[in-house]
Amino acid sequence: MDDHLTGILSNIGVISFVALSAYLLLLTGEISFGQQAFFAIGAYTAGIVTAMWQLPFWLGLGAGAAAGGAAALFVGLPTLRLHGLQFAIATLAFAEAVRILFELFRYQVVRDGEPVGPNGIEGFRNIRYIFEHDVSATQFMLIIYGLLGMTLFGFFLLERSRLGVAFRMIGQDGLLAAAQGVPVFRVKLMAACLAGAIAGLGGGLYAHLTTYVEPAIFDVMLGVHSLAYGLIGGLGTAFGPLLGVVIDIGLLESTRWFAGYRMIVFGGLVAVLLIVRPRGLLDERLVHRIRRLVSRRPPPAPTNAAVLGEEPS
Amino acid sequence: MIPFIQTTLDGLMVGSSYGLLALGFALIFGVMRRLNLSYGPSIMVGAYLGTLLYIQFGAPTYVVAIVAVAGSVMAGVYVERLCFAPLGVGAGVASMVSSFAIWMQLEQASLLMLPRHSYPFPSLTSGELLSVGPLVVRPDYLIMLAAMLAITAALHLLLYRTRFGLGLRAIIENSVAASLSGIDVRSTMLKAFALASAIGGVAGFLVLSANQQVTAMLGMWATLKGLIAMMIGGLGSIPGAIVGGLVLGVIEVHSQTLFGPQVRDLAAYGVLFVLLVLRPGGIFGTAAVSESAAHRGGDRWTTT
Amino acid sequence: MIAARGLLLSLFVVTVSSASGWAAGVKAKAEVSCAATAKPLEYDCAIKLSDARSGAALTGVEVTVGADMPSMPMAHNVKPVKATPGSEPGTYRAQIKLEMHGDWAVKVDLAGPVRDRIVKSMRFEPKP
């Protein structure tokens, strides 16, 4: 497979993780500007485990995901009491604080006569696991998509489980959900933890894909982008954020002839799209209609919006 | 003691620019209950237009100021028309993401105008420091503080002595009731947006002339500072925005003096985080933001 | 399910490949210097590749040069360009076209006898 195409597809795969992470929180009705922090934590952790401690790749990924989840738990406890903009800004403050902490973080060991490890602003280079162990670009892409597939499968199960319904209930109306016996805080915390782990996993993959991470990568831009992917692609299904990533990165590659005007075109397109479809392309109503067309038996209980036949508002 | 007062004074000066930025944010958020992520970039467009005139044509400072403010207003109106007006009351997140997309657009448009990382910007004063007793004051910053006080006073008059201000306050209180009372909510929102952008443009101009340079980071910087200051002071509260800005400025300058520039930003975010967790309403808001309050008419910010 | 099959396949591939290629391959070291050309945002980059351990020049390697902006990952991906071997052994030249000025992470991908990737952080500013 053409190396360039493999690279693009791998990028799409990795960024999808942080998009799914923001999407999961969005389902519970919370906007997070901070998922990039868990992406960063996952990246650095995985890099440290494989490049510095010379441990196996899967251990590194697992550690990255676990670190992301743990950090999300740690931050979720004080912040999930907040709502709306307060929560969003708290996550933003947390993520930027994490980024600055990585700018100050220095931890190096010597391998092959050269220092390896996070070096503050200069970042963490030479995360060369896939080169040292002869994993080809295509193989790594398959690993990325294998894990992404597993994650999507997890979302698939989630949408059909009580937990998934609880997520969307809280997202629609937290007070009503609480009145119906849903332990809102605990469920939100679970969502935050899962979202953190997903982002952490993606971060570990990203670090190994590019072999180089620096704090500047994990800035507010990445956070708002990951949120935007869900909104553009649609909040009806986990494929929505994926669609958003494909559109963004795919469009970025294809509008190459716009050269210096790419952002102008892309930004305008997104704004217009959101006027026409405020809940993204694959929003809940469309997904519900597709499910009804596809399945021969009656679909699972739809969300309130689809039942009431009105746009969620 | 004197160094402490000096640092605090410097912080207040810097904070007055943050206060102005936060003021614009608070106006928009108070009226529309939505976050405008294109606020900083709109200011950037105006500032860049002004810089362009300054560099290419040697325009005098007052022309640069007028162009900066006018450019900011034009960009703000563009954002309002494209991102906020067409989307209904409920679609809060969509309009925010839309404003983010336009952020990218405006930032790239500005960078196309002026691609370098930094450019010179005209200054208002000669730069000589004034001495007030044992303390030293930079005149540019003094102008900024004065401008902030003047604008705050003017805004207060506008809000409490004019029909337009009455309409604004009514919408901030409850937009549905306001429209039922016959207030043209849409056009008032547009005017509020323009006003907020104008204030932002002034803030931007003053900060840039105090620093005598403009950098490509202006958009992100203005958005972040305005947002943080607004949150510290209290979501959507106008006096809160000013206080929040001043507090942010003081915290920043003290942290920088004690620990250096990197910790400065870290301290600002740390304080913001702790404040949000302990007192989500900010300094001027209510101590707790209840769930029911979040569902008041027009305040459905999280659920689209 | 396709997802499960894909995962099993990739697991299998990884285990097999990591079992065979356990010895760490050649680690490359690169020196990159880019000079501005007459056209704005186009740069002529000279790359010098050597073995990080032995210091010997690396010849006959397929070199691809790309760039990415750290502050906006993948937003400004520069299309990777194949480098041509230079006059001296271990040197390669490539011409890259950037989208914007600022800080870029230049990626030098090696294929052929040596597989590696080196990332250099560089700042590109317009000529005064």
Image: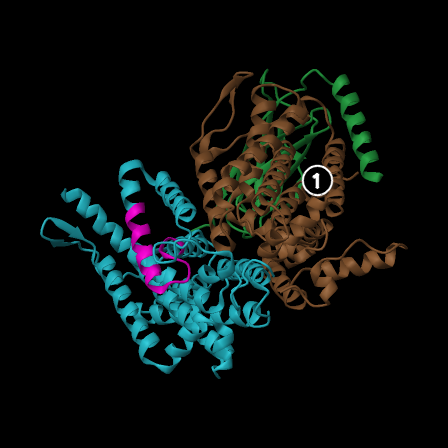
Chain colours: A brown, B cyan, C green
* Left or right for B143, reference B164: left
Q: Is residue B36 above or below residue A124?
A: below
**Which residue is drawn at the image coordinates 55% and 63% (left, top)?**
B300
- Residue B139, image x and y in percent? 20, 58
Residue found at the very far bottom of the displayed protein: B182
* Left or right for B148, reference A157: left
**Which residue is drawn at the image coordinates 57% and 51% (left, top)?**
A30
Q: Is residue B127 above or below residue C32?
A: below
- Residue C38, image x and y in percent? 54, 50
> What segment is highlighted magenta in the picture?
B231-252
- How many numbered badges does the structure rendering display? 1
**Which residue is nearer to you in this view: A187 or A246?**
A187
Q: Is residue A200 above or below residue B205?
A: above
Quarter assignment of residue A49 = top right
**Which residue is drawn at the image coordinates 14% and 42% (left, top)?**
B1
Q: Callout 1: 10 Å neighbours few (<14), some, many (20+)?
A: many
